[in-house]
Image: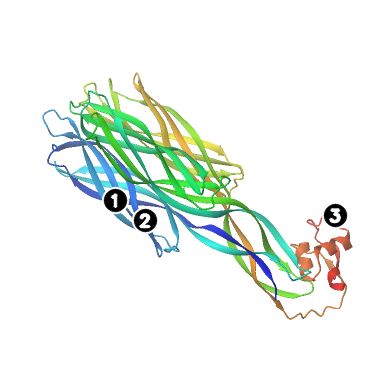
């Protein structure tokens, strides 16, 4: 019986990645406390996934979309008003090959909101969502690392540095803050909200991962006097995720998901807006593990058989971040004496090209401007698209590498200069890169009856196309060491076709 020593590896396998575009539709009724709609101005929203599930060959997502509608009221002064609509949705997406034991990582982004005023009290919404889905599974693989009781065992070993999964977990975190507004302002209603998670960082301590980030908050509100005002704030958020065995040398892959958002005038503190953001923080922890993979084996003296299996694993995983600057100008055309009330920014990645040690990304920013005249009574909207592209140096990348890129607006400034708007936007680009390596491993080694009746102590062999010393030695039950010694080979890794080789019987077998 062949005695083996095995090593257990926890492997996070990528099952598949897909991008879906789905349409969510819903209606809302303007509350009786608000005036009728004369015309819509703009719609802005946030999407939250509060439940997700992997089914057999399907993915289920349950969530809601909070839409802030800004409209002109059907009143004598046609003042600006606002309304919050919440649309619940359930989507079941086809994803062949997945099952309930697998792990889902989703990223859902609003790409477009269309609104249609059906009558003075009813509005219909159509929201286009882009859903990026990644499904993985955690599997324990036992790899043969040693064979003990075969003296002349010959092993073909490939060293591999893999990203072995240490553990994964999640936790809820909350960003809560009262945003102070001017003392002269009394809020009539919230017109628009914008949230971005920036400045992500992690620290490791005592079997826990401390995940820290900032939530960039921008809120447009209407005062009782009919003035449009804006408040901006950065709210810190942090959470501890339990991951037994985590160390400072490990790579922590952390993702933040919006679960719920509350924005309302503060009932306890005058001249302030209460903001509460519920986040779920997911963390996968990996260690760089050096593994010697036995991919082939034989014994010159024994007749051994084994099974061969394929194992796929992650290697060369890295998390990188960079700041990308976008500078441009927007012409106001015939508009004069305008004020910028609000700007919504939607990033889209159009193309990723991965080369050796670098990735190039290009995309565009869709800017939705809400502009007003001097008395803030005449509002207009303006849409513009601005391109961006950047190249990031990441050591170890090649054309087969996978690179996930997240683009988040971080700093934005818009200045009116004569008949132009000067645009200054800094984007935070977060990149997660890795390679998928598939290797052959051996298992279930057995010793069979030895039927070798070769009487020769030496064979003359002429090298054929595709030959390696390993294949030749295994075929004739010799060893690479003996073939190199007998033929005085200077470069065993490079043997020319047609070369004459003397193949001796294994020296161990003759003793």
Viewer-nearest of labels 2 and 3? Answer: 2
Find the residue positioned furthest to the top: 418
| Residues packed near mark 3 inside 10 Å, few (<14), some (14 to 19) or many (20 plus) | few
Counting from the top left corner in percent of width and height, residue 228 is at 24, 27
Q: Secondary structure at mark 2?
A: strand
Q: Quadrant of residue 386?
A: top left
Question: Which residue does the image show at 26% across and 24% down from the upper left?
Answer: 182
Tag 1 residue? 24
Q: Secondary structure at mark 1?
A: strand
| Residues packed near mark 1 inside 10 Å, few (<14), some (14 to 19) or many (20 plus) | some
In the rendered view, would you say 38 is above or below 108? above
Question: Which residue does the image show at 61% across and 45% down from the upper left?
Answer: 396
Residue 295 left/right relative to 205: right
Sequence-first disc among 2 and 3: 2
Find the residue positioned furthest to the front: 206
Rounded to the nearest whole Å, what is the CA distance between mark 2 and mark 1?
A: 17 Å
Tag 2 residue? 52
Counting from the top left corner in percent of width and height, residue 229 is at 26, 27
The mark found on residue 450 in the picture is none
Sequence-first disc among 3 and 1: 1
Viewer-nearest of labels 2 and 1? Answer: 2
The reply to whether residue 506 is visible in this rendering is no
The reply to whether residue 201 is visible in this rendering is yes
Residue 331 left/right relative to 468: left
């Amino acid at each position: 019986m062949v005695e083996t020593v095995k090593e257990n590896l926890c492997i996070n396998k990528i099952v598949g990645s897909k991008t879906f575009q789905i349409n969510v539709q819903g209606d809302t009724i303007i509350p009786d406390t608000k005036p009728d709609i004369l015309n819509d101005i703009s719609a802005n929203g946030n999407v939250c996934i509060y439940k997700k599930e992997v089914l057999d060959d399907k993915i289920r997502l349950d969530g809601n979309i909070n839409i802030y509608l800004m409209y002109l009221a059907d009143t004598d002064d046609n003042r600006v008003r606002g309304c919050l609509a919440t649309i619940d949705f359930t989507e079941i997406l086809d994803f062949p090959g997945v099952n309930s034991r697998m792990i889902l990582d989703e990223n859902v982004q609003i790409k477009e909101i269309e609104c249609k005023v059906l009558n003075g009290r009813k509005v219909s919404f159509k929201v286009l969502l882009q859903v990026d889905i990644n499904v993985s599974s955690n599997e324990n693989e036992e790899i043969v690392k040693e064979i003990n009781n075969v003296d002349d065992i010959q092993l073909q070993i490939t060293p591999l540095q893999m990203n072995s999964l240490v553990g994964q977990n999640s936790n809820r975190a909350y960003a809560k803050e009262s945003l102070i507004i001017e003392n002269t302002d009394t809020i009539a209603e919230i017109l628009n909200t914008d949230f971005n998670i920036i400045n992500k960082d992690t620290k490791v301590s005592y079997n826990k991962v401390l995940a820290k980030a900032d939530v960039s908050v921008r809120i447009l509100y209407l005062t009782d006097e009919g003035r449009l005002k804006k408040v901006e704030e950065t709210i810190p958020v942090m959470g501890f995720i339990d991951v037994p065995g985590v160390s400072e040398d490990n790579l922590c892959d952390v993702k933040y998901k919006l679960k719920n958002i509350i924005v309302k005038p503060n009932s306890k503190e005058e001249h302030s807006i209460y903001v509460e953001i519920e986040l779920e923080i997911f963390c996968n922890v990996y260690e760089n593990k050096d593994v010697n993979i036995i991919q082939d084996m034989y014994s010159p003296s024994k007749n051994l058989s084994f099974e061969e299996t394929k194992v796929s694993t992650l290697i060369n995983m890295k998390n990188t971040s960079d700041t990308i600057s976008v500078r441009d100008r927007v012409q106001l055309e015939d508009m004069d004496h305008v004020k910028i009330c609000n700007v919504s920014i939607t990033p889209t990645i159009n193309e990723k090209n991965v080369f050796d040690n670098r990735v190039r990304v290009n995309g565009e920013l869709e800017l939705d401007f809400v502009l007003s005249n001097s008395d803030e009574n005449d509002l207009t909207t303006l849409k513009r698209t601005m391109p961006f592209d950047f190249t990031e140096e990441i050591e170890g990348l090649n054309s087969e590498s996978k690179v996930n890129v997240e683009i988040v607006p971080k700093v934005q400034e818009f200045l009116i200069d004569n008949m132009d708007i000067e645009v200054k936007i800094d984007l935070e680009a977060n990149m997660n890169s890795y390679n998928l390596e598939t290797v052959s491993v051996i298992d279930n080694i057995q010793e069979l009856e030895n039927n070798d009746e070769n009487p020769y102590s030496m064979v003359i062999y002429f090298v054929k196309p595709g030959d390696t010393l390993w294949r030749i030695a295994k075929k004739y039950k010799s060893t690479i060491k003996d073939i190199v010694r007998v033929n005085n080979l200077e470069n065993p890794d490079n043997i020319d076709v047609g070369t004459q080789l003397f193949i001796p019987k294994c020296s161990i077998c003759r003793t």
